[in-house]
Amino acid sequence: MDQSQVNEVRAWARRLEEREGGNEEVRAASKAILMLADEVDELQQKLDAATAAKPAPAATAATATEAAAEPEPAVAEPAWESSRDEALSGSFFSRLKRTFGFQ
C-alpha cells in the first residue's frame, strides 16, 4: 500500500465511526482499521530504514557467477503455519488485545 491508500483507509474508518456513532461493533471495527493503518505505517518505516541501511551490492561478473554456484537457502516456514500463540504475538494483535481488555 502506498501512503495515499493508507490515508484513504484512515479517512474511511473515521467516516464510518462518525456515521454509526452509537453502534459499538462499528466503533470497534473502525478502531481496528485505524490500528491496522498505523501498523502499515510502522512496517513501512521499518522497511525504509532497513532498505536505506543495506549497502547496494556491486554488480560484477564474478559476483554473479559465485551467486549462481551457491545453493539456494532453505525457505523459512510461513508465519501463518507457525503455532497459534506465535502467530498472535505480533504487535497488532497485542495492541488489539490490550484495547479490548484481554491482556
Image (cartoon, helix red, strand yellow):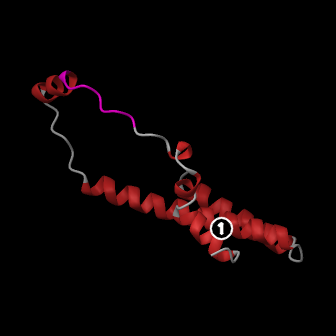
Q: Residues within 10 Å of mark 1 (few under 14, many from 20)?
A: many
Place of residue 95 in the rendered image (x, y in percent of width and height, measured from the top left): 59, 71
- 77 versus 86 height, above or below: above
Label 1, secondary structure: give it: helix
Name the kind of residue labelled 1 in the image. Leu
Main SS, magenta region, reads loop
Q: Is residue 61 left or right of residue 31?
A: left
Q: Give the residues drawn in magenta, as a range.
A: 69-75
Q: Determine the image quadrant of residue 70.
A: top left
Residue 15 colored magenta? Answer: no
Q: Determine the image quadrant of residue 103.
A: bottom right
- 57 versus 40 height, above or below: above
Say which residue appears at 52% left-offset and 56% top-offset: 86
Q: Nearer the viewer, residue 6 or 64?
A: 64
Q: Outermost residue toward the left?
A: 62
Place of residue 1 in the rendered image (x, y in percent of width and height, measured from the top left): 55, 51
Say which residue appears at 45% left-offset and 40% top-offset: 77
Residue at the disc numbered 1: 34
Q: Determine the image quadrant of residue 71.
A: top left
Say which residue appears at 17% left-offset and 33% top-offset: 59
Say which residue appears at 89% left-offset and 77% top-offset: 22
Q: Nearer the viewer, residue 84 or 42?
A: 84
